[in-house]
């Protein structure tokens, strides 16, 4: 059964969305379903080769833009791609392409006072300048409003707090605080120090009272700000193109659940950049499921990647936190697993590889120096990787195990080698920001947490998160309680209960527990609270598992 979401023409047929047997796809102007697979940055590269830092140059490889376009069109068709992703010379190629507008970035959004009239004027002009020239191009699939905007909760709260009192942004911030506290200033004083005596006096001296719940106020302002942004850019895109698909702002492998939810009314497709969580190609359950659940929209992956130390461009892969393996064979295997995991999710409608060619030998201008390419800096393809894309077909749903997996030998070192299909229980009604895994060996139960939470300590008086506000995992196993607090700069994990524990902090937190346990039936439930209690999720049911 096929259910169509119509997309009426601008002056040419345009792309839409379609659901086929429970799976979402893009719908081509000809009415066919399309799972979008294509590389980003499919462009001419460097104008010429720099001998001090060689990088890909189409002019050096092909001699002219026309020969480049002919070769790339042939390559992409032969390699199994059906589209090209962001930052590509899509109008010079023959495949469908996706447009990154960078609207907010034209005025430093979400900083630079998103609420001001000047910002709207900048964004309006940017939308017009970029959309009108391609309005009647039938291969333009749709628009991303931005890329990787910094929706960082605490820094945005402080930035808008510190704007000039008569600025639009400061007024919007104060209005948000008033709404949250129901215009009762005494409530503010229970959760913040250094407040002064009125809403108008709130300023730089504001600091969170430990354990009082003020982070929920910070989150409420963030929701107000992001809702304003999504509504604004949607209106401006629709002003110049009333029909093409609007696909969000390409999250940076991290999002706050409330931010994703605030976008729901103003996008047709949710978008995120997302490399694999582990270098074997596996991805967490919660990240994509929650993005879909929060927005109620299909999801497109706007960048994914895998690098190998073995490469022909001389890339050292040393400038950041991207997944890296040793060989091109391992690289191909990881990408194959990643694509299978993505496409098994019925709401994922495409994935765009970053990028067509390797980065320069000694790095881009920002220092990033990764073996990201389908081809090396000389234009020669990596055959093992190309074969993966050439043979790829979207897969069926992958079943999850209901039994407890055997613990790997390094279970307390990393979650990489855990069998992550053995998730303990489906998440409850809360928007999930973590997964819980189980494993076992003789005499022990292992519990693994993988959770997303950014711990910014800047709103505390001494710049250090207090114990009571650290992320908090509470477990109940056969009636016995365990409590783990983690996160914060140079803070050791805190454990209450009989277990061994290891925690790895970051935007993605890993917590591994080794717990003495007898064989037989196991009853387990759990609760996870984020930094400052801003978000909470539960594995609520008393689930009975046979170890």
Image: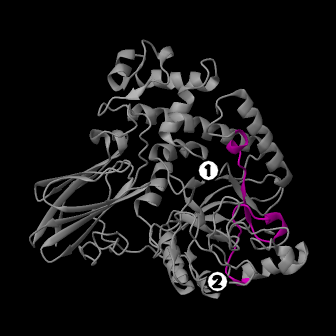
The vertical placement of 398 against 200, above or below, is: below
Please report the residue visible at 60 percent of the width from the left and 64 percent of the height from the top. 303
Q: Secondary structure at mark 1?
A: loop
Quadrant in the picture for residue 280: bottom left
The residue wearing badge 1 is 248
Residue 17 on the magenta segment: no
Please report the residue visible at 39 percent of the width from the left and 16 percent of the height from the top. 184
Residue 84 on the magenta segment: yes
Cα–Cα span, label 2 and label 1: 29 Å
Residue 180 in view, yes or no: yes
Q: Secondary structure at mark 2?
A: helix
Quadrant in the picture for residue 464: top left
Compared across the picture, whether 478 is left or right of 277 comes to left
The residue wearing badge 2 is 386
Q: Quadrant of the C terminus?
A: bottom left
| Front residue (pair 147, 491) | 491
Q: Which residues are magenta?
A: 78-107
Quadrant in the picture for residue 314: bottom right
**Residue 101's x, y, as percent?**
73, 50
């Amino acid at each position: 059964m096929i259910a169509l979401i119509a997309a009426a023409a601008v002056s040419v047929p345009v792309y839409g969305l379609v659901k086929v047997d429970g799976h979402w796809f893009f719908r081509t102007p000809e009415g066919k379903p399309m799972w979008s697979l294509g590389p980003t940055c499919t462009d001419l590269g460097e104008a010429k080769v720099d001998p001090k830092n060689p990088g890909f140059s189409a002019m050096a490889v092909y001699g002219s833009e026309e020969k480049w376009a002919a070769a790339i069109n042939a390559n992409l068709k032969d390699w199994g791609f059906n589209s090209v992703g962001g930052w590509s010379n899509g109008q010079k190629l023959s495949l469908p392409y996706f447009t990154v507008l960078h609207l907010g970035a034209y005025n430093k959004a979400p900083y630079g006072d998103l609420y001001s009239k000047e910002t709207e004027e900048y964004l309006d002009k940017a939308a017009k300048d970029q959309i009108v020239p391609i309005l009647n191009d039938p291969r333009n699939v749709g628009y991303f409003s931005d890329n990787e905007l910094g929706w960082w909760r605490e820094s945005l709260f402080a930035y808008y707090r510190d704007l000039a009192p008569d600025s639009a942004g400061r007024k919007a911030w104060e209005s948000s605080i008033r709404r949250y506290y129901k215009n009762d200033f005494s409530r503010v004083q229970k959760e913040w120090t250094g407040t002064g005596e009125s809403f108008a006096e709130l300023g730089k001296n504001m600091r969170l009272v430990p354990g009082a719940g003020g982070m929920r106020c910070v989150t409420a302002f963030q929701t107000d700000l992001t809702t304003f942004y999504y509504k604004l850019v949607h209106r401006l895109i629709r002003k110049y193109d009333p029909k093409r698909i609007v696909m969000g702002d390409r999250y940076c492998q991290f999002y706050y659940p409330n931010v994703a939810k605030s976008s729901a009314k103003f996008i047709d497709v949710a978008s995120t950049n997302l490399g694999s969580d582990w270098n074997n190609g596996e991805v967490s359950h919660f990240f994509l499921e929650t993005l879909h659940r929060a927005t109620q929209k299909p999801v497109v992956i706007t960048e994914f990647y895998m690098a190998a130390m073995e490469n022909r461009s001389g890339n050292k892969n040393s400038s950041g936190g991207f997944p890296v393996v040793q060989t091109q064979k391992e690289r191909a295997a990881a990408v194959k697993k990643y694509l299978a995991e993505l496409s098994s999710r019925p709401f994922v409608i495409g994935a765009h590889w970053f990028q067509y060619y390797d980065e320069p030998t000694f790095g881009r201008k920002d220092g990033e120096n990764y073996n990201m390419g389908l081809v090396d800096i000389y234009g020669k393809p990596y055959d093992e990787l190309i074969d993966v894309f050439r043979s790829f077909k979207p897969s069926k749903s992958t079943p999850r195990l209901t039994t407890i997996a055997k613990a790997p030998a390094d279970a307390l070192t990393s979650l990489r080698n855990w069998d992550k299909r053995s998730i303990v229980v489906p998440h409850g009604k809360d928007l999930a920001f973590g997964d819980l895994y189980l494993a076992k060996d003789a005499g022990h139960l292992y519990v693994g947490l993988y959770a997303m939470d950014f711990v910014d300590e800047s709103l505390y008086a001494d710049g250090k998160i207090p114990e009571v506000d650290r992320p908090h995992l509470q477990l109940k196993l056969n009636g016995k309680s365990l409590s783990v607090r983690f996160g914060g700069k140079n803070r050791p994990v805190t454990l209450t209960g009989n277990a061994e524990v290891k925690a790895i902090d970051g935007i993605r937190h890993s917590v591994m527990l080794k717990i003495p346990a007898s064989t037989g039936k196991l009853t387990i439930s759990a609760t996870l609270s984020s930094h400052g209690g801003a978000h909470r999720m539960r594995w609520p049911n008393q689930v009975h598992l046979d170890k």
